[in-house]
Image (tube, rainbow, N blue to C red):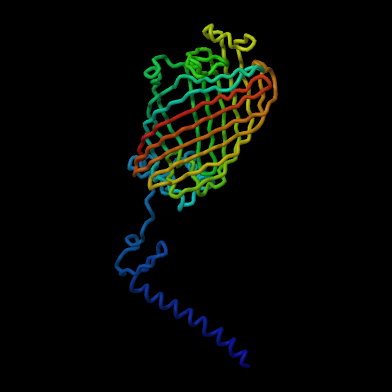
């Protein structure tokens, strides 16, 4: 009987309680209006209209108008786009979430989409090693190539225009071409280059020749021609949450705390250059082994890269980066090469240094990068490299 009584009480009492609560709400609605929006309850006088109390969501704005009003942010969901552009923005947001996320205690965004930079770039080609089985030692470097210009960047897209000023330094017209492309996000980076260089070269060591009892001397030489060299590098950063390559080389992030990362990647290079010693003065030609005056180097490298990169925040607003990435793999020498068609072991090195200073919207950078390729066969052993120094001053907005 007790059990039955409890069941009857449950059936009768609970509906009555619910009905009472409902009636209380209805009584409230007779005297006032209740507005519910964004998890907020507001009790308003009954004579107010509903349209005056419902708070509307943030107003939508067309993307062109957002740019004009300086309100554009690609992650702002209130900005509207045409259908195709909207698809591209959604793909970008997905990629940004997936590949470009950092630990905020180590890396901060700059909060700006635009950058304007003034740059000065300087680079040279160097050659050191020995030629032929007689191991004639050589050491040479091209005259420096220098340029100044400006670069405007919007997020991942940028355009730069540089003026060559090499003739102001060396007094000679430059004979070179160079193109660089790079993309960097938290997880990985891609670099592509294409270059040719026929600038005059200076010889500093040539076999057993001595100048005033020293092997070191300087002799102008026009016989080195580097044509259509190109390559592509890709790197993955294991500690991508805390280490920001972009903070050191793109000025698009701020490294707040020191961090480093192991790097794994790939490298492909096509190298093509020649040394025509027929243009040498006669007093140097006698040191050529076997009288051979022409050496050709043309080969492709297919390598795996393994290295380490470190960002050191040694003082507020200051960042020093050091990166070393050796690469090992196979080298395929072409038929035009002095060594002929051969499959060789490839050993290359890419090393970087960066010093960056951030002050509010303004930033300044000093970058030094070297790419080296060691060609070693039964006849020749030559380390050729391109060394690059860039000075940058810019502003974010």
At horizontal 39% and vertical 33% (from top left) the residue drawn is 392
Q: Is residue 57 left or right of residue 329?
A: left
* Number of numbered discs overlaid on the protein picture: 0
Above or below 32: residue 348: above
> Which residue sits furthest front?
213
Quadrant the N terminus occupies = bottom right
> Which residue sits furthest top?
282
Q: Is residue 52 left or right of residue 205?
A: left
Q: Is residue 97 left or right of residue 162?
A: right
> Where does residue 110 sit, x and y in percent of width and height?
40, 45
At horizontal 41% and vertical 40% (from top left) the residue drawn is 356
- For the residue pair 260 and 110, the one nearer the viewer reads as 260
> Where does residue 292 sit, x and y in percent of width and height?
62, 10
Quadrant the C terminus occupies = top left
> Where does residue 322 sit, x and y in percent of width and height?
49, 39
Question: Quadrant of the rendered structure where residue 290 is?
Answer: top right
- For the residue pair 320 and 381, the one nearer the viewer reads as 381
> Where does residue 332 sit, x and y in percent of width and height?
67, 24
């Amino acid at each position: 009987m007790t059990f039955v009584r409890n069941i009857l009480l449950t059936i009768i009492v609970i509906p009555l309680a619910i009905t009472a609560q409902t009636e209380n709400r209805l009584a409230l609605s007779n005297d006032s209006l209740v507005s519910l929006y964004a998890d907020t309850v507001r009790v308003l006088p009954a004579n107010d209209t509903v349209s005056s109390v419902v708070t509307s969501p943030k107003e939508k704005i067309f993307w062109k108008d957002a740019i004009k009003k300086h309100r554009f942010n690609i992650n702002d969901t209130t900005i509207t786009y045409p259908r195709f552009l909207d698809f591209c923005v959604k793909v970008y947001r997905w990629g940004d979430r997936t590949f470009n996320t950092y630990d905020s205690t180590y890396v901060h965004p700059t909060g700006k989409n635009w950058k304007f930079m003034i740059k000065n770039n300087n680079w040279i080609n160097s050659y050191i090693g020995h030629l032929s089985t007689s191991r004639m030692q050589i050491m040479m470097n091209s005259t420096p190539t220098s340029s100044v210009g400006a670069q405007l960047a919007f997020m991942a897209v940028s355009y730069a225009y540089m003026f060559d000023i090499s003739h102001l330094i060396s007094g000679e017209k430059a004979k070179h071409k160079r193109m660089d492309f790079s993309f960097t996000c938290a997880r990985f980076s891609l670099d592509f280059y294409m270059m040719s260089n026929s600038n005059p070269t200076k010889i500093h060591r040539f076999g057993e020749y001595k100048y005033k009892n020293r092997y070191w001397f300087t002799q102008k030489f026009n016989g080195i021609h580097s044509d259509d060299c190109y390559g592509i590098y890709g790197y993955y950063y294991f500690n991508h949450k805390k280490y920001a390559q972009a903070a050191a080389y793109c000025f698009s992030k701020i490294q707040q705390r020191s961090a480093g990362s192991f790097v794994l990647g790939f490298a492909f290079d096509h190298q093509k250059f020649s040394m025509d010693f027929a243009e040498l003065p006669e007093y140097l030609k006698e040191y050529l082994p076997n009288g051979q005056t022409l050496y050709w180097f043309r080969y492709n490298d297919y390598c795996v890269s393994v290295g380490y990169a470190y960002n050191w925040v040694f003082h507020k607003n200051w960042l020093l980066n050091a990166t070393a990435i050796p690469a090992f793999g196979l080298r395929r020498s072409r038929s035009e090469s002095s060594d002929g068609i051969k499959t060789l072991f490839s050993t290359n090195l890419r090393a970087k240094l960066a010093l960056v200073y951030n002050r509010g919207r303004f930033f300044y950078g000093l970058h030094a990068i070297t790419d080296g390729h060691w060609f070693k066969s039964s006849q020749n052993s030559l380390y050729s490299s391109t060394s690059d120094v860039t000075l940058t001053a810019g502003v974010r907005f």
